[in-house]
Amino acid sequence: MDGVVQLQRQLLDYTALLFQEGFLNDQFTQLQQLQDETNPDFVVEVVSLFFEDSERLLNELANTLDQQSIDFRKVDSHVHQLKGSSSSIGAQRVQNVCIAFRNFCDAQNTEGCLKCLQQVKNEYSLVKNKLETLFKLEQQILAAGGSIPM
Amino acid sequence: MEISGVLSRRNMPDEIGGFDLSPGHSEEEAHVLAVDDSLVDRKVIERLLKISSCKVTAVDSGRRALQFLGLDEEKNSAALDGLKVDLIITDYCMPGMTGYELLKKIKESSTFRETPVVIMSSENILTRIDRCLEEGAEDFIVKPVKLSDVKRLKDYMTREDRDGNEGRGINKRKLGEACDVSPSFSSSPPSISSSSSSWSAPSSPTSLDSPTRRLKTSTCD
């Protein structure tokens, strides 16, 4: 069972690192605590919804900011939604960029908004990557007959 | 979508789209109607409620909530027979009908005005909180919603049955944390910092009525 123990340690270390680096916050832990035998895929399901939702919103944001005359209320509405869902899964860094993004919307600052869009795309991409790695580790543990450590 | 037997009612259409019903409604378990336009948040609140032994109906808009409660203007039917809703929990910022507007409609109805309504919002804006409480909301939860929030709701859901208006707690947990105020295209004073621990305000909402704590409301009023 050495392999399983090693994988479990890897998972714990990796998760801890994500928290340290600010990619995830306590809300993610909350979600993990809602997972049990009756609902073993809860976190993956919620995070998948977050991925779908975010990708839709990022596309909308790109379109809205691409217009001749930018509708900042619309931009703000999209960012508000993205901020909400990232907050609900504990994606701290995405959430933080959204906060800055909304300030630029309020100021109707196009350049600021475009910069934030780029930033939020980056942060989203990073956290998506990290979460997918985390889920892969979990799968490996389960496949090796182990259980997910908390 | 499949509708459980508890909704059998002559005036109900055969199918109502957009509802997510948990099967096997039981008389013992509290039944909560959750309203949120965010798919992610609906999934989370649903799980939070189920893990707290509540039956959940989750809908994605105020309009659908009113349809479910039989309060939709387009229908002449009164409330559904045998449909017990012990709590309505709704997001504030929703397209179409806001949670505040939904709250008002519920409080205007003879059938559901006694049902406790809780508002959720990602934005910690005192004028918003005040307004909801004044309109009769039982509580106001700042998102993201945690298990401890839902556990607290359960407490006063049962208390409500016995004691009427007792136990008007307000979740001020997030007051001290940095949050964006979203001043809606005009400048506004920053969020007030105060104790970040949870406290219960006295039952009268006027305790919040301090001029220096008033903040401009955001876009979705």
Image (cartoon, rainbow, N blue to C red):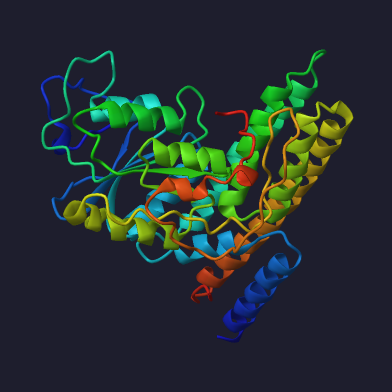
For residue B106, above or below residue B121: above
Residue A53 % position (x, y):
59, 37
Picture quarter containing residue A40?
A: bottom left
Question: Residue at 50% of width from left, 42% of height from top?
Answer: B129
In front of the other: B114 or A97:
B114
Picture quarter containing residue A8?
A: bottom right
A106 left or right, relative to B26: right
Whether residue B206 is visible: yes
For residue A112, above or below residue A137: above
Question: Residue at 73% of width from left, 19% of height from top?
Answer: A71
In front of the other: B157 or B187:
B187
Residue B125 % position (x, y):
58, 43
- Number of marks in picture: 0
Residue B77 % position (x, y):
17, 19
Residue A87 % position (x, y):
61, 50
Toward the bottom, the furthest residue is A2
Whether residue B91 is visible: no
B56 left or right, relative to B60: left
In front of the other: B194 or B2:
B194
In front of the other: B102 or A121:
B102
Toward the right, the furthest residue is A111
A64 left or right, relative to B7: right
Question: Residue at 67% of width from left, 48% of height from top?
Answer: B191
Question: Residue at 43% of width from left, 60% of height from top?
Answer: B200
> In the rendered view of the protein, which quadrant contains the N terminus of chain A?
bottom right
